């Protein structure tokens, strides 16, 4: 059952037949080819890259290149990002996911606020309105580069950059022009078209990237249709370089939920079962921005980037007993101003100003009584409206960074960010936790509690201080202390549970120390990082759904990112993580789990690794084998149930038939391993998202 119209008027643009889209830009490319070659002046400054570069001297960063992204040909973000150290994108069904970056997999409606997802340096959602599945809202499949920063980066990027940052940079328009199309097919009615076109015309550079996909789903009553469109326009206007971008994504998904029972993922009769055939997720998002960048003085730069965003999503909460329908959305507008310059003898400074306004809403409706033999569940989860509210928010922030060149080999970098976030909440339904008719529930009250109208303001400071030393072999040592934060998300403040009338929540904070060494030894490039973090005011939801306020956790570990060019044609890429994530408090909640100081945080494997062997004959063919290792982890906060972990092997290869035409093959899970993408224990049940059995995908690619 679906209560809302998900489709904005511009959906018609996204569902244009791919043939029409290709024809349109082919004609434009032909006209452009008849014109004189265009020489656009360029400014050697990119505001997003400048912000990233100020992080590099005393901080970790891992990147996926355009070629690595293309070779992986991912159908889910996990296939790409899990190649990096300290990162685990826990795959759900279809395009769904949960994120872990130098952290456990965090669950609950607001825990996604611990991670910041950027598109060309701009958050894809307004502060306070995160989406746990928001990676499907960006075109990572055709990106030019993906950068991941692990650990707190609030000093530069602000709230939500608590545990890490994912920055997806779109492939830039190519002045040489050209088009590329790749058609893919696989099992379970999988089909996908990826198309890119670069056009030089009318003193401008244009680029369009389109993705259209259909997957029939390997589990019963599952599958999705998805489309993505990115349109870019680069133009020189006087001394300003203007880069405009429009992004649209659309998803309609039939979702398969958990399978139940101990080691159910190993049982062939259960792996494909879908106990929630009615589950679905429909979503769309659109974003537009215009980055205006110019030189400033002799060596400085200035960038102004206004942006607008809008998104809506509807889905069935199939993982909860009441199986409610949630409908949420947001509209936002903002301005990001960045600037910087050199001073003194090799010193650098830069700053950022950000202002943002957002208007969001959430409505949750339970259409039917709970189907359960438990009188408690039936009574405390009555059908009808659970929540119906609107929230306006205003974000104001400023950031400053100074990079001191103390000696030819030693640098000191210090950063500071001040940020204020204000919510104006308007409850559009009954206050309190009564039934829809205003009467109270038994067993101490209804589960769902709606606070009265209110305002909330969160003021935060993020900071970073670091040293970088370059030794005689040009290897670098860095030592960094950081302090990060994330304000509570709107869902944590205003979607309350029984017994709560006001959410007494403060911003989560994290203190971090990091020691790193990076460099190269002959054909080997490496980055080794040791870290220790302490997080306070943690807003947790344990495996039974109980909210935990004012929690504390400790995190420490080591990460390795290494590449070895064995020969001119062979290479190895290794990423490995050993980490321990523990609770640092005791809790014994009514109806919840017992948590003890020193227990492992659930869904936090101690060991993760990815090893990729590549062989490439330039201009002819390439082959890569990827092995992934996932260590064991606790399935519940009480540490009573454990998942054993798994290993998988993937194969990908491409062969050039001509200089314009090539074919590809991908074999995922070559050994047909029975494993779980996600495992937990909740409501008295073992629950799993099973990993997909062996699958083969074929592709035909052409360029012109």
Image (tube, helix red, strand yellow):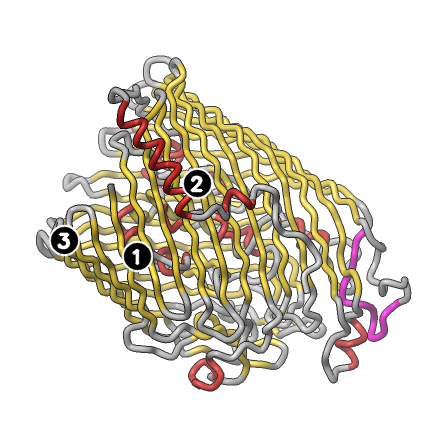
Mark 3 to mark 2 CA distance (whole Å):
34 Å
| Residue holding disc 1 | 72
Q: Is residue 537 visible?
A: yes
Eye-nearest disc, 3 or 2: 2
Nearest to N terminus: mark 2 or mark 1: 1
On residue 565, the disc is 3
| Quarter the N terminus occupies | bottom right
Residue at image position (48%, 24%) is: 304
- In magenta, the rendered stretch is 440-451
Location of residue 567 in the rendering, given as x and y in whole percent from the top left corner = 9, 55
Left or right, 633 with respect to 515, comes to: right
Number of other residues with Cα within 10 Å of mark 1, as a class: few under 14, some 14 to 19, many 20 or more: some
| Quarter the C terminus occupies | top left
- Secondary structure under tag 1 reads helix
* Whether residue 13 is situated above or below residue 253 in the rendered picture: above
On residue 230, the disc is 2
Please check the rendered image and state whether residue 77 is part of the magenta-colored stretch, yes or no. no
Nearest to N terminus: mark 3 or mark 2: 2
Location of residue 92 in the rendering, given as x and y in whole percent from the top left corner = 49, 66
Please check the rendered image and state whether residue 443 is part of the magenta-colored stretch, yes or no. yes
Location of residue 683 in the rendering, given as x and y in whole percent from the top left corner = 63, 77
- Secondary structure under tag 3 reads loop
Magenta segment main secondary structure:
loop
Left or right, 627 with respect to 103, comes to: left
Do callouts 3 and 2 mark residues in contact (Cβ within 8 Å)?
no
Nearest to N terminus: mark 3 or mark 1: 1
Please tell me in which quadrant of the rendered image residue 469 appears: top left
């Amino acid at each position: 059952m679906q209560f809302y119209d998900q489709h904005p008027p511009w959906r018609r643009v996204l569902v244009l037949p791919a043939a029409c889209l290709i024809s349109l830009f082919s004609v434009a490319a032909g006209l452009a080819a008849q014109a004189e070659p265009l020489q656009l002046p360029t400014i050697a400054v990119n505001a997003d890259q400048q912000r990233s570069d100020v992080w590099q001297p005393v901080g970790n960063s891992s990147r996926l290149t355009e070629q690595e992204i293309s070779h992986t040909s991912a159908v889910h973000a996990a296939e790409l990002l899990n190649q990096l150290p300290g990162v685990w994108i826990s795959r759900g069904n279809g395009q769904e996911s949960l994120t872990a970056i130098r952290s456990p997999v965090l669950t609950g409606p607001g825990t996604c606020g611990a991670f910041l997802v950027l598109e060309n340096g701009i958050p894809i959602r307004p502060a306070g309105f995160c989406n746990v599945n928001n990676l499907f809202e960006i075109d990572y499949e055709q990106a030019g580069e993906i950068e991941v920063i692990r650990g707190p980066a609030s000093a530069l990027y602000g709230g939500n950059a608590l545990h890490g940052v994912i920055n997806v940079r779109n492939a830039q328009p190519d002045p040489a022009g050209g088009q590329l199309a790749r058609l893919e097919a696989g099992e379970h009615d999988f089909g996908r078209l990826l198309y890119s076109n670069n056009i030089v015309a009318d003193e401008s550079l244009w680029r369009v990237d389109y993705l259209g996909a259909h997957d029939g789903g390997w589990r019963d009553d599952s599958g999705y249709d998805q489309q993505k469109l990115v349109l870019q326009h680069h133009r020189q206007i006087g001394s300003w370089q203007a880069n405009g971008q429009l992004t649209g994504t659309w998803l309609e998904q039939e979702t398969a939920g958990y399978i139940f029972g101990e080691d159910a993922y190993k049982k062939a009769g259960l792996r494909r079962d879908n106990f929630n055939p009615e589950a679905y997720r429909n979503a769309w998002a659109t974003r537009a921005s215009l980055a205006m960048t110019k030189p400033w003085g002799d060596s400085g730069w200035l960038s102004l980037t206004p942006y607008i965003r809008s998104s809506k999503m509807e889905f069935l909460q199939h993982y909860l007993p009441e199986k409610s329908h949630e409908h949420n959305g947001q509209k936002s507008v903002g301005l990001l101003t960045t600037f910087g310059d050199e001073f003194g003898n090799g010193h650098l400074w830069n700053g950022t100003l950000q202002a943002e306004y957002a208007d969001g809403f959430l409505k949750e409706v339970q259409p039917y009584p709970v189907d359960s033999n438990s009188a408690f569940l039936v009574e405390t989860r009555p059908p009808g409206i659970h929540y119906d509210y609107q929230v306006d928010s205003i974000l104001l922030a400023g950031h400053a960074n100074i990079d001191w060149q103390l000696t030819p080999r030693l640098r000191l970098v210090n950063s500071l960010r001040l940020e204020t976030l204000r919510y104006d909440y308007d409850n559009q339904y009954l206050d309190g936790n009564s039934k829809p008719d205003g009467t109270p529930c038994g067993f101490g009250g209804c589960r769902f509690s709606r606070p009265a109208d209110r305002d909330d303001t969160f003021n935060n400071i993020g900071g970073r201080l670091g040293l970088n030393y370059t030794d005689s072999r040009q290897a670098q040592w860095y030592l960094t202390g950081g302090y990060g934060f994330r304000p509570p998300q709107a869902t944590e403040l205003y979607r309350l549970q029984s017994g709560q009338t006001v959410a007494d929540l403060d911003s989560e904070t994290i203190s971090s120390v990091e020691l790193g060494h990076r460099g190269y030894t002959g054909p080997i490039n490496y980055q080794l990082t040791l870290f220790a973090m302490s997080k306070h005011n943690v807003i947790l939801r344990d495996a039974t759904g109980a909210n935990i306020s004012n929690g504390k956790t400790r995190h420490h570990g080591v990460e390795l990112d290494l590449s070895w060019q064995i020969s001119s044609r062979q290479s190895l890429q290794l990423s490995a993580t050993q980490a321990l994530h523990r609770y640092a408090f005791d809790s014994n909640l009514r109806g919840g789990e017992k948590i003890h100081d020193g227990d492992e945080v659930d869904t936090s494997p101690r060991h993760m690794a990815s090893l990729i062997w590549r062989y490439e004959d330039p201009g002819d063919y390439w082959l890569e084998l990827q092995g992934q290792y996932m260590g064991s982890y606790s399935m519940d906060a009480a540490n009573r149930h454990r998942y054993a972990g798994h290993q998988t092997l993937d194969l990908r290869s491409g062969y050039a038939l001509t200089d314009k035409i090539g074919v590809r093959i991908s074999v995922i899970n070559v050994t047909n391993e029975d494993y779980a993408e996600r495992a937990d224990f909740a409501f008295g049940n073992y629950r799993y998202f099973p990993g997909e059995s062996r699958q083969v995908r074929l592709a035909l690619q052409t360029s012109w």
